[in-house]
Amino acid sequence: MRGQKQMSRIKSLLFLLGVAAQVPLASGANITHVVGNCKGFPGLPTISAALTTTPPPTVVEVCPGTYPEQIQITTPVTLEGITANNSTQAIITVPPGGLVVNTTDGFGDSLAVQIWVDNVNGKVDLTNLIVDGTGNGISGSNWAVGVLYQNSSGTMNHLTTQNQNLTTAATGVGVWLDGGSINPSVTLENSNIQAFDDTGVLATGSSTSEISATVKGNYITGNPAGSVYGIRFGQGVSASVTDNLITGFGASLWIGIFADFGSGEEGSISNNTLDSPSFGILAYADGVSVSSNRIYNASTSIDVASSVAPVTNNVISMYGGISSDAVGIDFECLAGNNVHSNTITGGFYGLYKVPTATVTTNIYNNVATIRSGGC
Amino acid sequence: MEDDLMSRFKSLIVVVMAVQIPLAWATVTYAVGTCEPKLTSFTSIQGALNATPSPSVVRVCPGTYYEQVVIGTQVTLEGISADNSTQAIIAVPSSGLKVSATNDLGQPMAAQVFVQSSGQVDLTNLAVDGTFNNVTASNVNVVGVFFLNSPGTLSQLKILNQSGNGKGTGIWLQGGIPAPSVTVENSSLQNFDYAGIVAETNSNLYELSATIKGNYVAGTSNNNSTGIELLSGLTASISDNLIAGSGAGIQISGGKSSISKNTIDSVPVGIDVETDGVSVTSNTIYSAFNGSGIGIIANSTVAPVTGNTVAQFPIGILLYCNADTNVHSNTILDAVIALYEVPGDSMGTNKYYNVGTINGGGC
């Protein structure tokens, strides 16, 4: 009798344990795959193999190592490099033979993407990964892209993209955030974007496909042979660009941050530090404020082609000797009273092409010509 | 009636005395240039400084002044705004720079502005340009501003082009008894070929208090210049500066210092700690140079090295088989080796991302 009771309790316990184990699986429990062999058992050989298993994984842990593959992500997932064997370096590299075009953008441009987050209904998070474009082999008008979020939401943290460069038409992009029908929200933070030959971080939308982009706390540096934009965004983008260090020192970076013309564009550019780009910030969008940035050693620190966008409380320090020809803020004969309360040091012109009726109060030190009109 | 007259006369004397008392303490202000016609004006800065009575304020009109300036008494020397400009440049005389002093290391100093005063000397809103300094002797320091045992504040200065013989330094602060306090803030130092700022005293005591904050310090990209170099005999607070260049960002070989919240960009060596009396906290250090370089050299078992972010260096932090758990709570991103030459198992806890080898190099 006692033995039957005990057996019954054991059966009940097993049943409960079984139910408990199954329920989360049926309702979307975490499914974790490992890529590489760093956890004491054989993992999957490639990241793509892990992502395409059925059911799809929620987490893919990538052992330290080098993975020569182009990756497409179509379901929500966290893809993260992990620490093992005294290393924490998972590098996604170019497959032998170079990158192949695997998608297009909204304008029909051909993109060869190393990590393509493709219209995912849910979040995709990338953490602690290096995406290296060395040997991409891109020619003609095709684009080499480290990471593309296309109509997808998620967060990239402690990501490194590098060497999206040496393309024949200077069409390398580190991280590209493209909007779409779900109006995605993407964050790029604490990451290192370097050695691209066109743009470090690019955010694009359209009149019908918007995107919310947060770009904060990143280090963005140009290509020694020349880069065009550190960060660029345009139509349909709601952007928050804060606390980044963007540098062209010892490299070559044409424009630090470019808020392009376009409808539906809004947001803020604040608390960034820019060192030695040719142009610091181009503020062309009415809905984007530019405040409390520090811009050093640019030929033109801020170029404002908007009579609306607030440009305030920025600190500008230019080369200021006997041969300086630098410009602090270029009003482009368009900006006006929306520009004020900035501190401008050095340079030949503090304010350039200022419309005659403009009333603007700023602080000037070591500026050869405080204000130049001509409009 | 006579008493009344005497009383009024005495009152008048009191009034006259009252007027005279402030005169004895009044500010004496001169101008340099022609933009302040109501002030006594001079054609050169040195002419104003040498005038009698000694000025307490010298206001420098926009323009270029080709002279080496020597300041021996308390004064405020400031560039002012006039005629749509606020740029007063102290430039090299046509004959080049001459040696104007010797420092306590026995080195000749060709200083563009030489300050030796027991009273406070403040410099504001001036550019000091060393272009065409014409100094070729390899033992002569070409210096933008040399503060020798003098208290003061240097604010909103542009110091540039102290270069040519490999011994060009933007600002050189030397202490002594009675241990002056000097602040360098919100200034820009560029194109030097030895150091942006040097602070030192040839003493085992702390005979200089230096505060260096909010400056932009950038050497040229093709030499081995140091951003800020702290030698011995001083206490220093180095904070909130942006330092870029091709040598070391900040190098500390003596004294007692706090190095915090600086951003160091594109240097082969970010911060080099070669003494115990320093704390290195909450700095951000990046390198755009691939192939060589070290984020922080921590050559001390005592100096706290904590809360820093180091990115994009072949070696994140070099512990020199010397530092150990005093190095902790740092974030290291993108390094071939995060910690190098770690003694024994005494490694502090840090965060690592995209690091090839976390703990490398034996001792």
Image (tube, coloured by chain):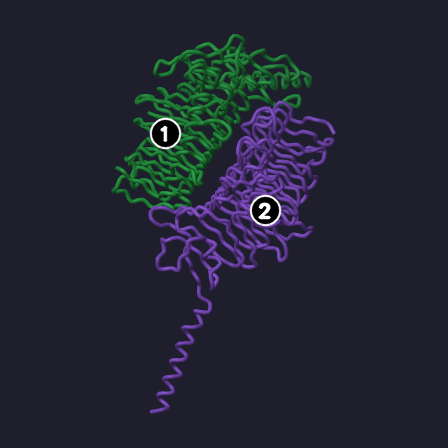
Chain colours: A green, B purple
Q: Quadrant of the N terminus of chain B?
A: bottom left
The C terminus of chain B lies in quadrant: top right
Question: Residue B152: percent from the left, percent from the top?
Answer: 53, 54
Q: Residue B274 occupies which quadrant of the picture?
A: top right
- Can you say whether A282 is above or below A372 in the image? above
Secondary structure of the residue carrying numbered label 2: strand
Count the marks: how many? 2
CA distance separating discs 1 and 2: 48 Å
Task: Identify whether B234 is placed above or below B261.
Answer: below
Within-10-Å neighbours for mark 1: few <14, some 14–19, many 20+: many
Chain hosting mark 1: A
Residue B146, given in percent of the width and then of the height, sits at: 56, 49
Residue B331 visible within the image: yes
Tag in front: 1 or 2: 2
> Which residue bears the numbered disc 1?
A259
User: Most extreme residue toward the front, as rendered?
Assistant: B95
Snapshot quadrant of residue A80: top right
Residue type at mark 2: give it.
Met
Q: Residue beneath label 2, please?
A: B109
User: SS for tag 1?
Assistant: strand
Q: Residue at x 47, y 13 (%)?
A: A72
Q: Nearer the viewer, residue A128 or A193?
A: A193
x and y percentages locating residue A191 in the rendered image: 51, 27
Badge 2, how many Cα within 10 Å: few under 14, some, many 20+? many
Q: Determine which of the numbered discs, if any, sits on residue A321 in the image.
A: none
User: Does label 2 lie on the same chain as label 1?
Assistant: no
Amino acid type of the residue that numbered disc 1 sits on in the rendered structure? Ala
Give left or right: position of A204 versus A160. left
Which residue is at a point 42% across and 38% down the rendered structure image? Answer: A324
Q: Is residue A55 visible?
A: no
Q: Chain of mark 2?
A: B
